[in-house]
Image: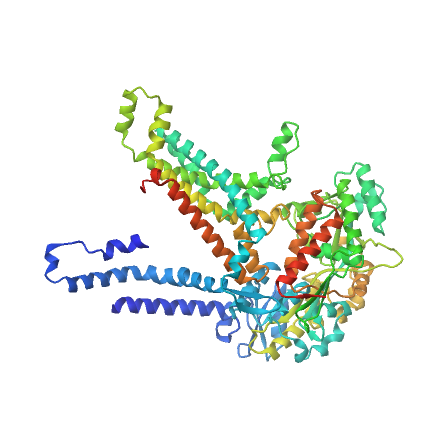
Amino acid sequence: MKAPILSVAGFAAAAALALAGCSAGGGEATAKASCTNTIVNKEAPQVTVWAWYPAFEQIVDSFNESNDDVQVCWTNAGQGNDEYTKFSTAIESGSGAPDVIMLESEVLSSFSIRDALVDLSEYGAAEVKDNYTEGAWKDVTSGDAVYAIPVDGGPMGMIYRQDLFEKHGIAVPKTWDEFAAAAQQLKDAGGEGVLTNFPTNGRAFSQALFAQNGSVPFEYDSTKPTEIGINVNDAGSKEVLEYWDSLVKKDLVTTDDAFTADYNTSLVDGTYAVYLAAAWGPGYLQGLSDADEDAVWRAAPLPQWDAAAPVQVNWGGSTFAVTSQAKDKELSAKVAKEILGTDEAWKIGVEESALFPSYTPVLESEEFAQTEYPFFGGQKVNEDVFLEAAAGYEGATFSPFQNYAYDQLTEQLYAMVQGEKDGSKALDDLQASLEQYAKEQGFTLK
Amino acid sequence: MATTIAPVTARPPSPTRKTRPDLKDRRRQRWGWLFVAPFAVVFLAFLILPLLYAFQMSLMTSTLATGTNFVWFDNYAKAFTDPIFLGGLLRVGRFALIMIPAQMLVALAAALVLDNLSTWASKFSRLLIFVPYAIPVVIGALMWGFLYSPRFGPAGDLFGLLGLDSPDFLAQSSIFASLVNIVTWQWAGYYMIIIYAALRGIDPGIYEAAVLDGASSLQIALRVKVPMIASSMVMVLIFALIGTLQFFTEPQVLRAVAQGAIPVSYTPNMYAYSLAFSYSQFNYASAISFALGIVVFIGSYFFLFLTRKQSGLK
């Protein structure tokens, strides 16, 4: 029996080594091998970071060159849900998470409730609070706790095809009533496409449209983690859905799924004359192929329900959080605060990654406001549209089961556009399913 | 596993070994274990241990707000009364009713035709029918996603030639048929090979006898060949049944382009996946997986029992 035992032991040892290699994300010895970037100062302790920003390597390099006491070891672990799935598994298994992780603000509660994030108020978050807009800071806090440092935001505006508007004599709509009229006008003029698309899988996009009409879907405070208020079937949201449902019924807008190859092509080939977008939208458009070469893009403020009292909303935007698996929390917090907390880093962030900063020293700078964008024929879109939208954004509260809430929203919106139920019924059903889920998960409803 | 070990550890009765059986036997066993060890270690580490761990997880609850508790079989009680899980089971049941006969008919027809041909065309056709199976399931589903796309797919042009509007293959009403099509395309070739191999194993003398008795080739195919390959057909049926009850990859991939028509809980496996990885309910997801495993086991056993005559088990 000697040989087999040896081979078993040998195999087990090899397997253990392999597993250790996989899971030791934060270990200094093994982490060096898995960095995407090159470490400048090999003596300094390393902090592992997961992030998917475009051109992030330049930002990491710039950080590593200017810091002797800490080095960032960066990995791109996928975008959005791909990364969250890995993070979620790492939390469950108790190892394998990075020290610092890029998260969208909407999922912070979902991870903080699992004790996966460090409260940064103990690590000097207050010092940098003034560097961020109020709305962005509210997005990362819950009660007194600060679960992340804001990075970029997605204030919303309306990106439209000026050439198509002019061709059909359509004026740029300022209110949703005008927007509906413009959609009718485009159809009557025999335009090939539609004014815009209303995706049933819009998730945060749909939520932003509701928020513009006064929806506050969740009340949640991590200091009372078992209490939640759910109110997704308010009158404002119902008005928004009924508005879109009527446009859908009249064939004035399409209901294609967002973020598919079909949708991407429709965005840039003139099928949709309007792209209701966040500030990161232009960057997204530029990355798409098959664009119509004659397209003339312009940006305008998002249409309003009441032009006299405009409401600004936000779609997306991300942050850096420190995970509870971080080896050195102090050092990790420093990385979270500083990696995109300097003017130099943001120069790269704005110019190379087309990020829209929540970092006020850049956001409020004259240079940022006056930037002319070749994509928009030289229009200063920040000054015209997005800065105002960012300044007016007041922040939002997300649920600790946001992914479930969005999946349910998608199902209800799909049922609505299929004609199975009206918008009001869809939201009532959504409310019922979320309340039931919250109870199953042990929450008390406020 | 049993079949792997049996030849190594079996003790064939042999008169010469009766003199000192223990020593020789033990030596033989030692070598047997040695040969089995690499497999056994991997099998234990990556199948049995995770299964035990998952089973243990399925006996506990862990909610977002209240933490982890041991609850015995509460999760199973919940699973078998969960309308989403039961709805998913019903859906894969419907898939099984349509998809398995479709695959078997295509596979059987192709195998019978190929068995009758003996030209170079038959070898070539055999390859062509088999090729979809060689394409990874994810790639195949992605590819069909594009073929079904109203913008990139060929359907728009084909129907356009006839002056018709192309149907939307990704709509709620047609997604079922679209998925049946993908699976049949992918698996019929594989089942065809199994059936074809069984057909080649039949003694051609039987056909001669049938011809002498005045049977037409259609009669030979249906009355002679099909009954003689019944056990292979049963095997194909069991493969297809297990695969269909665990339906996951195709709808999961196609969901990327049809999120409305394919909700996250479309099949029990997709439900377990989203529970675990989107909603972080690992305990309930484990229970759902085991519950599905029980259903698959009972379903397969039931079918084996029903077809025990055809499969030669009785």
Q: Position of residue A146 (x, y in %)?
A: 69, 74
Q: From what the image shows, is residue A403 above or below residue B302? A: below
Instruction: Answer left or right for A96 relative to A223.
Output: left
Question: Which residue is depicted at the point 16% across and 65% down?
Answer: B23
Taking the view exactly as shown, the residue that stands out farthest to the top is: B214
Q: Nearer the viewer, residue A157 or A246?
A: A246
**Picture quadrant of residue A36:** bottom right
All told, the count of numbered labels is: 0
Q: Residue at x 45, y 64 (%)?
A: B53
Quadrant position of residue A150: bottom right
Residue A200 visible from this viewpoint:
no
Task: Say which of A381 and B309 sits in front.
Answer: B309
Q: x, y percentage for residue B265?
A: 58, 51
Which residue is painted at 19% across and 56% down in the image? B11
Give the image location of residue B181, x and y in percent: 52, 38
Residue A388 appears in view: yes
Which quadrant does the N terminus of chain A fall into?
bottom left
Return the residue nearer the eye: B191 or B23.
Answer: B23
Quarter of the image with the C terminus of chain A is bottom right
Counting from the top left corner in percent of width and height, residue B73 is at 50, 61
Tell me how the rendering is colored.
rainbow
Q: Which residue is most to the right?
A: A308
Q: Residue at x 27, y 62 (%)?
A: B34
